[in-house]
Amino acid sequence: MGSTVFVTLQGSTSEAIRILAGIVGIVAAVASGVQTAGKYGQQAERHRQASRHYSTVTRQIDEILADPPSADQVKAALDGLRKNLDDTGAMAPNVPPRIWNAPVGTELSHLFRSHQDAAPALPADEPQA
């Protein structure tokens, strides 16, 4: 497509327009290459899968707390929980160092541009639902 634009613009437009079209084409190609090389879509899907697996483990913990196993079933219940946690941890992507090394309680939303507008903060005087 890029070469078609240059052929079309060759004789009928100013040099500034041709340069601008070239810059836009180069920026688009670089952005596409970065996205492909970064595999951001695949990484996001791996995080979504890990989130679903951790949700399953959370539900399993809730079930154990809601209906505690008998004394002779505790070991089996904990072994199952441990196996699910191990399996989930093995398939989950690694957490980036900037997040892993952040002090506990640090607000990390500034590291994720897509999350900044996702849930606007409520003013301090409004009760949360």
Image (cartoon, rainbow, N blue to C red):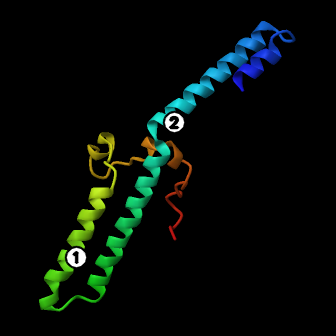
State the image quarter where residue 1 is shown: top right
- At 76% from the left and 21% from the top, the residue drawn is 5
Name the secondary structure under disc 1.
helix
Q: Which amino acid does label 2 sit on?
A: Gln
Q: Where is residue 87 in the image (x, y as percent from the top left)?
A: 27, 64
Residue placed under numbered mark 2 in the picture: 35
Q: Where is residue 79 in the image (x, y as percent from the top left)?
A: 18, 75
Is residue 113 found left or right of 83 in the rendered image?
Answer: right
Is residue 46 found left or right of 104 in the rendered image?
Answer: right
- At 20% from the left and 81% from the top, the residue drawn is 77
Q: Nearer the viewer, residue 58 or 6?
A: 6
Sort mark 1 into few (<14), some (14-19) or many (20+) by Cα contacts within 10 Å. Answer: some
Q: Which amino acid does label 1 sit on?
A: Gly
Q: Position of residue 82 (x, y in %)?
A: 20, 70
Residue 86 in the image: above or below residue 60: above
Residue placed under numbered mark 1 in the picture: 80
